[in-house]
Amino acid sequence: MALRAGAASQKGTTRAMISIRQSLTSRLLARRAVRLMLALFALIIAIFITDIFTSELEAVLKNGGHFGDFAWLMLLKTPNVVDFALPIVLFLGLFFAIQGARTDNELVICAAAGEPWYAVPRTAIAFGLGAMVVSLTFSGLVVPWSSYALRLSFHELVTRQFIDRLTEPQERLSVQEIDGRIVIAAPVDGAARGRLFVFSAVPDAPQIWRAALARDWAVTGPDAAGSYQLELQGFREIQGYNSGSGHAPGSTPGSTPGSAPALMGGEALALSRLNVSRLSLDFQLDSVVEAADAERQSSERFLFAEGGPQDGLLRQPDGTLTAAPTRALGEMLARALLGLVAASVAVAAAAFAATRSGRWIALPVGLVAVMAADIGSRAILGDAAGLGYPRFWVAFAALSALGLAPAMGYVALRGEALVTPARDQA
């Protein structure tokens, strides 16, 4: 009994030792790969921000924004970069992690401790599966949310600038067109705001025009109902009417007080004038600024939400409609699958780099393979989305096998080269 207990204890200890040893390669490569991928992501995001920095900053400043608005808008644009760069970053991170561990003879030490060579591709596949989850999370949740928030945030920025122009005195001439009216606000000249001039034509009667001038003006609000109030001091409105008969609408020729017929290009010009010492007008912001569309657009809907990427329709030959994925879902799954393909290609490229001929071309060949897989898979699965779900999943499975089999087959043939020291490579 004691002998059996000792044997059982020895087996348990052996299993524990094997479990610890099996995690050595994974922990070694994971530390290297994560550091490299974080550095690459930081570099790519920095390049992206540098590329659009000037144009985005100019757009924010033009609309009266400040640094906080600029930082928020740039943050909302970043998820698109992360989803796009993930496969390339994963490939480079795993490739250089394997290369560095092999060059430093760390993989040889792991092999001497009993680590099998296939622990390297096993770790890479784990990274690839994680990349698939991250890609679907970004493309299905984060990117739609950021796109929706970006559109509303920019509209809010434009609206806030318009409100500031209305409610805050300006130091320079402001010219805007609102609902077909040309509004000119003069700088402050001792009054609260300065003079306000508005010119407009009557849409149903283009021969009629109106011009209004206010000596002083102010905007207050909004109130509890969201209304603003426009206070006009010394308001004067002039209405002009071009007509061969020479009379303004609703008047008889030459009989309206305050109007005076004149000749202009062979036609009579009738003028009517309205003077008011004080005029108060209520208006809603939606009447002068187009309201933001709160409805999510197709690219802003979450995965598995109603009307989302998976919620498409396919018309059958008999005219009936059946459920089908959208092209967006096909491209989304293709980009997610590319994470797994990029991980397998990274291991194959590292094995190829152990040969004399592949030492210099393994990295560029691997990069070209990943980018070609990106373009090809998105095109194939995007088109397959129009065939309905059954054929789409067949295409997805076939594409997965086609993307993984060549790389994994090469790794199976030359797996031991992954842990071969650099001085022993042939």
Image: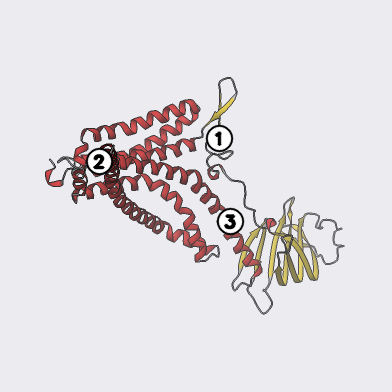
Q: Which circle, 2 or 3, is nearer the viewer?
A: 2
Gap in Å between the C-alphas at discs 3 and 1? 28 Å
332 lies left or right of 237: left
Which of 106/412 is in front?
Answer: 106
Gap in Å between the C-alphas at discs 2 and 3? 47 Å
Vertical position of residue 260 compared to residue 4: above or below: below
Q: What colouring does the structure picture have?
A: secondary structure
Specify the label residue 311 is tagged with. 1
Q: Residue at x 85, y 59 (%)?
A: 253
Secondary structure, mark 3, is: helix
Vertical position of residue 400 compared to residue 346: above or below: above
Which of 256/71 is in front?
Answer: 71
Which of 200/298 is in front?
Answer: 298
| Residue 341 horizontal/vertical position (percent) | 34, 38
Name the residue tied to disc 3.
Answer: 155
Identify residue type, mark 2: Ala
* Quadrant placement of the N terminus: top left
Gap in Å between the C-alphas at discs 1 and 2? 38 Å
Which of 173/41 is in front?
Answer: 41
Name the residue tied to disc 2.
Answer: 349
